[in-house]
Image: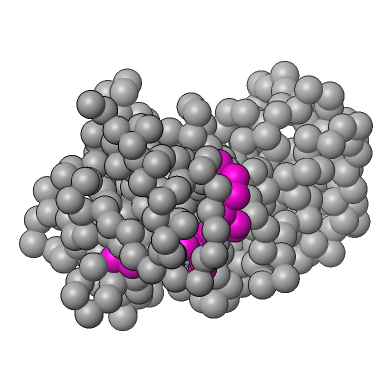
Amino acid sequence: MTREIPKNERVWAKGKVIHVQALERHTDLRALNFHCDWLLRNPNAKEIVFVIEDGFRIFPNMMAPLASLFCFLESVNVKAKIHINHRTFTDCYAHSPIRCVEREKRADPSNVVWEYRSASELELLIDWVVSNLYRKVPSQKNTLLALEYCLSEIMDNVLRHSKDQAGFFMYSLQRGDQRIAVAIADQGIGIKRSFADTSYRPLSASDAITLAMKKGVTSSADGAGNGLWTTTEIITKNTGQLTITSGGGAIYYNKSLGKVDTYDNAPTIDPEWPGTNLDFQLDFQTAVDFAGLWGELPSPINTRAERLENSEDQLVLGIKDQSFGTSTRESGRDVRVLAANLLRTHPTELLLDFTGVTMISSSYADELVAKLYIDDTLENVRNRLNVTGANATIELVIADAIRSRAKP
């Protein structure tokens, strides 16, 4: 049986060389899989050359699957030889993903491909990402908590169901940091094959994806079967942009266009290890109502905020621990965004604890305290925001900053 070569002017092959002008659409990725599969059908294949052309742009939903592809080639002893003429591709580490271990922690974990191989690495990676976003991105109620929940559920599925050794993850911020684009990929057995030992019998790969998205459906005996359903509810009610490809099947959900597209028979690298890719977007300016989405199911617990609670149920933000210095506006902004996100999520009082801090600059006080004090988007903020542990000098600097900012 002959196979039709996908019509794609952005990904093409000549001999054992695959030229990649762009990976920006799912049709590009399907063409890449087709050419790799074609070359791997040669039992003597030892190397595939990838030529990344000039003008190549980076997108998480393409780079995470590409990293998974390179890892698969290595597992079958086929070398991926990459020719590039610019740093854009190199800087995202798709060809050599960053292993999620403590020594690799970085101030900004975005725009690079991460690799995780255990539950501890998964938890470390999610903590790095969400902690960074709490400081960087002003967010509406429960949106960051919803993101943390989605990442935990989806990334854990790789470890529990794919039978692959690793998962690959990448994210980027878009639209002035108001939206996040996330991609998670593996080269495992695929969703359809994960149902092999259950009573479910999906007819196609896309049927299997649709089945996995339903409430109460699971492929493991110890699962509740709500993980993918709950995450799908969050994503589709937020931005409504979700794509799942697995085992040659695909589902594209686009709320703004009001449609769901399904496909089958897409090229895969290996029928036994077709992999699963999931990419979605969340809008930080859209609040998430867990009760409205899930009904009787309990909402996720914000353990990040719980760790900041004192015996009187106040949130205590230790400036000495949370701030990278107290002299610049940049440092003040990081803590202000963190404090504002906490105030939006919890209706309780927030204490800015300056214990152990000897001096702050007027710009730091203005950026952190004064701007919070006049933020009308924070409900009852003037009664809920308080300073504790400050010496007399810091109190004077803060009072002066508030006086300068406060409306008459």
Residue 321 part of the magenta segment: yes
Residue displayed at 21% across by 46% down:
382
Question: Which image quarter: residue 298?
Answer: bottom left
Can you give x and y, in whole percent of width and height, for residue 396 in the image? 41, 51
Q: Is residue 17 left or right of residue 323?
A: right
Examine the rendered structure and indicate whether residue 160 appears above or below residue 180: below
Q: Please state which of residues 311 and 38 is positioned toward the viewer in this rendering.
A: 311
Residue 191 visible in the picture:
no
Residue displayed at 22% across by 46% down:
381
Magenta region: 315-329
Question: Which image quarter: residue 309?
Answer: bottom left
In this view, which residue lies farthest toward the left? 296
Can you give x and y, in whole percent of width and height, for residue 312 in the image? 19, 75
Can you give x and y, in whole percent of width and height, for residue 390 in the image? 41, 64
Q: Is residue 406 left or right of residue 41?
A: left
Quarter of the image with the N terminus in it:
top right
Q: Is residue 241 left or right of residue 32?
A: left
Residue displayed at 47% across by 62% down:
319
Residue 359 visible in the picture:
yes
Residue displayed at 62% across by 28% down:
24
Quarter of the image with the C terminus in it:
top left
Question: Which image quarter: residue 128?
Answer: bottom right
Q: Please state which of residues 32 and 321 is positioned toward the viewer in this rendering.
A: 321
Residue 201 part of the magenta segment: no
